């Protein structure tokens, strides 16, 4: 591990980067870096180690510095120099990352030296200051997960600017449809060119390949290293004018003419020309908006370090000749098309009021449409006005979703991170955070308390009064930003100010929300995820919402009994990348290599949840959440024994039952299979049976499910009791005459219970003397 004394200053690293990138022929090293950093196999995307690749911000930094001087397109004197410059770039970018982490290491060192006898409140205050220190946020912002797919920028483009369409067309010749067609065209051209590269995934497979070559060269390190270097060029064999079958392990076999072809074709991988576009497209206006002519005096002169305005990010197309346009990172072009129109309109003083109003309206509409698709139109309300008894508006809720006895208050903001925030200016960062997160949370707390008290009156956007069918006993707060907000999850937890008894909020970008809605399109699954994220805010840590979601879809967000905190690997976000990206692109991929497709799932359990959701019970949300808390083994056992119990009744025409207590959640289930088709009789028997089982186990909550003999459904009667346990003479008598449990499923951890073990129903008796 690098010691703190070895860490360079950021400004010194930037200077070293500039020394490297202005070397002769560096542009070709950069092209190779871009290929290996951003070219991915969709089948393997979830296995990619992104830490070893450069992200878009790092490459944008390099290009932003590169265009400050004339770019040297001359070829290097020796092809090995290309690899040396590439290797040096990776080393310097690692140094840059270390330099940005330096404040963290220094503060951590001080924090760890705090004496153990310091008062707890003082220690907490110190640790709060630890994270609020200036420069502590540059690293998480600069290295944050993108948090958005390129196609999302285009999908949201006309939704975000729907009310600004006229201004954009008249002032910038910016048409939504033309922009989409041009971007699609560019992506298609560049992807087609990129197919000529035989990509070897060397970043992931280097050690495996090295091991095999080591056997081939029998320990000859000179030949081994030469072969590994040449392997990098053999990915580009077709760029030399050769076909893939003429590879060998000696790159010096390429002639000077073939090397010239290689450099020319390598650069050409990222070049589009005007003739690549249909004549009816206004490509000239598009290029005027998003391209820069290179080798201009004073170009990008204000860009000196991270956080400074980098003109390349706003105009990610570099015009390198009269008809050749270099597009190194297409993702940045998608991002610029989404972000830049706001800044264009912001320069028109006469349009500022309209701009603010339009942003608010469009953002609210986008979120409402997403949430309505999950909770249904009857349970989703927009622009809710909360009025006190005196008729004074207490607050408003942008979107309110109701699910039985649970509610979701959503507050929507359209705040961007200012450049000063990206540079680590704590004052500006707090200001931006206040506008994007804190204000939304504070408003959410007021809204939450209003809904829980049910004292104010609630009115929808049309003035109609909203009444809640069930008494709301919990309200979750969600904030949504319409902008891509780097490090949102990190900041929302670190900088948020809240009272001790108030719950955490869940903050998302609108891009996160779209993906959550796709995967959690059942209202109970969606609300359960929100609850788990909020309840476990201090337990799980990850760098983006997609990491939390990916983990939840595979394993479920639930505490480990032997872990105080859990940090989730960024690769869990790759689960979404691997599944969602190909789906949206319409690309067929193998299900075998897709972790999401191969996750655990029990279709009968899904049916059980749907059946409970259809019941008219005010506490059905609590019931479903309790069942969703079960682990995979417990779910499988529950379904298995329910079906087996019903099957016994069909065979012998007798009553049968099973019980499943979950001691760690103080919740249990009784399933009763009735030998008749008499619904009223089943209700009476199940009520006695369920209450007695709950009483015997001293549980807080108990679910009773009853099945009629001839019914094809998993159950026909549902009873739920969640009153506090207390001594009851009648129930004491009743439990003496309870039928024996014919089936008691495994303990929650899947381990079988021994006959002499304590029964896990909580009675304190041995299993053989109790439920066994």
Image (cartoon, rainbow, N blue to C red):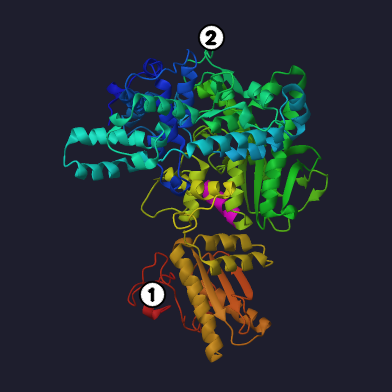
Q: Is residue 409 visible?
A: yes
Viewer-closest of 7 and 412: 7
> What residue is rendered at 26% in x and 41% in y?
210
At which x and y percent is residue 521? 62, 54
Label 2: which secondary element: loop
At which x and y percent is residue 697? 47, 71
> What residue is rendered at 34% in x and 27% in y?
255
Closer to the N terminus: mark 1 or mark 2? 2
- Seen as rendered, the residue at the extreme top is 297
Viewer-closest of 59 and 375: 59
Q: Which residues are magenta?
A: 525-535
Viewer-closest of 198 and 49: 198
Viewer-closest of 128 and 516: 516
Label 1: which secondary element: loop
Find disc 1 in the rendering and name its residue. 765
At which x and y percent is residue 353? 76, 24
Q: Is residue 191 magenta?
A: no
What secondary structure prevails in the magenta region? helix
- The mark found on residue 673 in the picture is none
Q: Is residue 231 above or below residue 656?
A: above
**In the visual, does 721 lie left or right of 142?**
right
Find disc 2 in the rendering and name its residue. 298
**Label 2 neighbour load within 10 Å: few <14, some 14-19, many 20+:** few
Q: Which quadrant of the rendered structure holds the C terminus?
A: bottom left
Q: Is residue 637 above or below residue 568?
A: below
């Amino acid at each position: 591990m690098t010691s703190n004394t070895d860490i360079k200053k950021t400004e010194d690293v930037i200077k070293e980067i500039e020394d490297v990138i202005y070397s002769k022929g560096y542009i070709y090293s950069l092209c190779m870096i871009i290929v290996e950093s951003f070219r991915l196999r969709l089948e393997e995307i979830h296995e990619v180690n992104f830490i070893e690749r450069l992200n878009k911000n790092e490459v944008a930094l390099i290009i932003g510095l590169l265009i400050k001087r004339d770019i040297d397109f001359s070829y290097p004197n020796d092809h090995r120099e290309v690899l040396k410059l590439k290797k040096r770039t990776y080393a310097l970018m690692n140094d840059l990352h270390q330099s940005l982490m330096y404040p963290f290491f220094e503060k951590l060192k001080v924090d760890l030296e705090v004496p153990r006898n310091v008062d707890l409140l003082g220690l907490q205050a110190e640790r709060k200051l630890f994270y609020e220190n200036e420069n502590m946020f540059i690293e998480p912002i600069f290295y944050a997960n993108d948090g958005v797919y390129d196609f999302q920028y285009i999908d949201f483009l006309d939704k975000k600017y729907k009310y600004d369409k006229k201004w954009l067309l008249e002032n910038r010749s910016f048409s939504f449809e033309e922009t989409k067609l041009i971007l699609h065209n560019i992506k298609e051209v560049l992807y087609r060119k990129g197919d000529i590269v035989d990509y070897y995934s060397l970043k992931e497979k280097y050690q495996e390949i090295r091991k095999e070559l080591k056997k081939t060269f029998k320990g000859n390190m000179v030949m081994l290293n030469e072969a590994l270097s040449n392997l990098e060029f053999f990915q580009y064999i077709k760029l030399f004018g050769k076909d893939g079958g003429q590879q060998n392990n000696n790159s010096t076999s390429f002639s000077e003419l073939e090397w010239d072809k290689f450099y020319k074709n390598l650069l050409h991988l990222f070049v589009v020309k005007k003739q690549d576009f249909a004549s009816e497209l206004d490509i000239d206006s598009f290029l005027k908006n998003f391209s820069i002519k290179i080798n201009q005096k004073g170009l990008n002169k204000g860009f000196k370090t991270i956080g400074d305005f980098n003109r390349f990010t706003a105009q990610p197309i570099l015009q390198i000749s009269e008809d050749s346009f270099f597009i190194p990172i297409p993702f940045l072009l998608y991002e610029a098309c989404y972000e830049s129109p706001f800044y264009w309109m912001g320069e028109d003083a006469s349009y500022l009021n309209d701009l603010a109003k339009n942003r608010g309206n469009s953002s609210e509409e986008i979120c409402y449409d997403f949430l309505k698709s999950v909770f249904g139109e009857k349970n989703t309300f927009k622009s809710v006005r909360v009025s006190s008894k005196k008729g004074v508006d207490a607050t408003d809720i942008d979107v309110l979703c109701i699910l039985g006895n649970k509610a979701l208050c959503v507050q929507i903001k359209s705040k961007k991170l200012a450049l000063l925030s990206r540079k680590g200016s704590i004052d500006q960062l707090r200001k931006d955070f206040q506008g994007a997160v804190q204000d939304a949370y504070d408003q959410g707390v007021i809204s939450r308390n209003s809904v829980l008290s049910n004292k104010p009156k609630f009115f929808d956007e049309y003035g109609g009064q909203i009444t809640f069918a069930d008494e709301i006993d919990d309200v979750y707060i969600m904030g949504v930003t319409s902008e891509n907000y780097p490090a949102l999850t990190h900041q929302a937890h670190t900088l948020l100010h809240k009272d001790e008894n108030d719950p955490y909020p869940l903050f998302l970008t609108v891009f996160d929300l779209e993906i959550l809605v796709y995967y959690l399109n059942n209202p109970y699954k969606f609300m359960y995820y929100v609850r788990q994220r909020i309840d476990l805010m201090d337990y799980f840590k990850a760098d983006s919402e997609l990491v939390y979601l990916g983990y939840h879809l595979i394993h479920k967000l639930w505490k480990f009994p032997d872990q105080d905190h859990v940090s989730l690997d960024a690769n869990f976000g790759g689960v979404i990348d691997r599944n969602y990206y190909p789906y949206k692109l319409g690309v067929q991929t193998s299900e075998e290599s897709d972790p999401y497709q191969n996750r655990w799932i029990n279709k009968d359990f899904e049916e059980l949840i749907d059946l409970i959701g259809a019941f008219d019970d005010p506490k059905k949300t609590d019931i479903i959440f309790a069942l969703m808390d079960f682990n995979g083994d417990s779910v499988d056992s529950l379904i298995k024994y329910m079906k087996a119990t019903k099957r016994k009744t069909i065979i012998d025409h007798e009553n049968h039952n099973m019980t499943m207590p979950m001691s760690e959640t103080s919740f249990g289930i009784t399933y009763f299979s009735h030998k008749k088709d008499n619904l009223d009789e089943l209700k009476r028997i199940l009520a006695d049976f369920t209450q007695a089982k709950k009483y015997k186990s001293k549980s807080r909550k108990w679910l009773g499910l009853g099945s009629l003999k001839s019914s094809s459904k998993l159950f026909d009667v549902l009873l739920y009791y969640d009153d506090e346990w207390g001594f009851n003479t009648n129930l004491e008598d009743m439990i003496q005459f309870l039928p024996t449990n014919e089936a008691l499923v495994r303990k929650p951890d899947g381990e079988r219970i021994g006959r002499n073990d304590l029964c896990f129903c909580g009675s304190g008796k041995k299993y053989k003397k109790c439920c066994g």
